Image: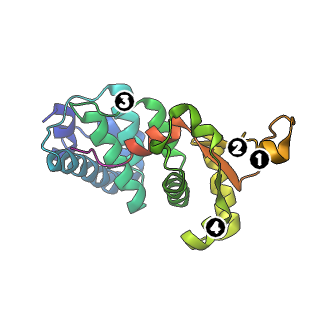
């Protein structure tokens, strides 16, 4: 197993990864970082792989952010992101940008994102078509048991982070020769970045 994850699991010199969080949040932050390493190890063990070294520009901010995460759903995503970063097969290229994006998501944002890509199923189409296949989000509040405001705010966050994009789809029957107009949050499209980010926040596959 890679030395950096051994450090997380054993708790040795863990403060060098957590930095200021260790001083302010003490034992709880250390325990969350240890749980992060243990969960990442389990995810890789489940697919029969051992961890490879993780680039410091990904590992350090990832552990710092995860050590402060108290939401269990998001904590699992941090562990999956670490597991994918440490996956020796590198099925997903985890970059520092993924760490920064996950840091900005709430659990509701993550829920809306997953539902959006379940509806979009971009894997069924050419990459070039993803951003021209709108998903209508008006049914999201009922499906996710959220308020319309919660969904709208989450979609705004996803748009800002480029996890989805305003629809530019044109229906020639109705739109004629009009230029595409950015649509409101009830009509959005998947992006390659959003799809790959979502994959990176799920446990590695065989």
Across and down, in percent, residue 59 comes to 33, 33
Q: Secondary structure at mark 3?
A: loop
Circle 4 residue: 139
Q: CA distance from mark 3 to mark 4?
A: 33 Å
The earlier-in-sequence mark between 2 and 4 is 4
Across and down, in percent, residue 34 comes to 24, 50
Circle 3 residue: 93
Which residue is rendered at x = 69% and y = 67% of the image?
A: 148
Q: CA distance from mark 2 to mark 4?
A: 17 Å
Q: Is residue 204 magenta?
A: yes
Which residue is rendered at x = 50% and y = 40% of the image?
A: 125
Residue 54 picture quarter: top left
- Vertical relation: 72 (above or below) 145: above
Extent of the magenta region: 202-206
The earlier-in-sequence mark between 2 and 1 is 2
> Circles 2 and 1: CB distance less than 8 Å?
yes
Give the foreground label among 1 and 3.
Answer: 1
Circle 2 residue: 167
Which of the two residues, 180 or 17, is positioned nearer the viewer here? 180
Q: How many neighbours does mark 3 have within 10 angstroms: few (below 14), some (14-19), or many (20 or more)?
A: few
């Amino acid at each position: 197993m890679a030395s950096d994850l051994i450090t997380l699991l054993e708790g040795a010199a863990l403060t060098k990864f957590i930095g200021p969080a260790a001083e302010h949040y003490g034992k709880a932050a250390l325990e969350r970082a240890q749980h992060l390493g243990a969960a990442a190890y389990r995810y890789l063990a489940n697919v029969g792989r051992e961890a490879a070294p993780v680039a410091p520009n990904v590992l350090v901010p990832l552990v710092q952010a995860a050590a402060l995460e108290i939401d269990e759903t998001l904590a699992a995503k941090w562990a999956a992101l670490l597991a994918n970063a440490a996956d020796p097969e590198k099925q997903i290229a985890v970059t520092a940008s993924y760490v920064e994006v996950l840091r900005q998501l709430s659990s509701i944002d993550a829920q809306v994102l997953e539902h959006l890509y379940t509806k979009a199923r971009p894997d069924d189409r050419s990459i070039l078509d993803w951003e021209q296949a709108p998903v209508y989000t008006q049914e999201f509040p009922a499906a996710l048991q959220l308020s319309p405001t919660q969904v709208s705010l989450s979609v705004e966050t996803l748009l800002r982070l480029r996890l989805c994009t305003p629809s530019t789809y044109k229906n020639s029957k109705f739109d004629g020769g009009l230029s595409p107009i950015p649509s409101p949050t009830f009509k959005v499209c998947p992006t390659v970045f959003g799809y790959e980010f979502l994959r990176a926040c799920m446990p590695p596959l065989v």
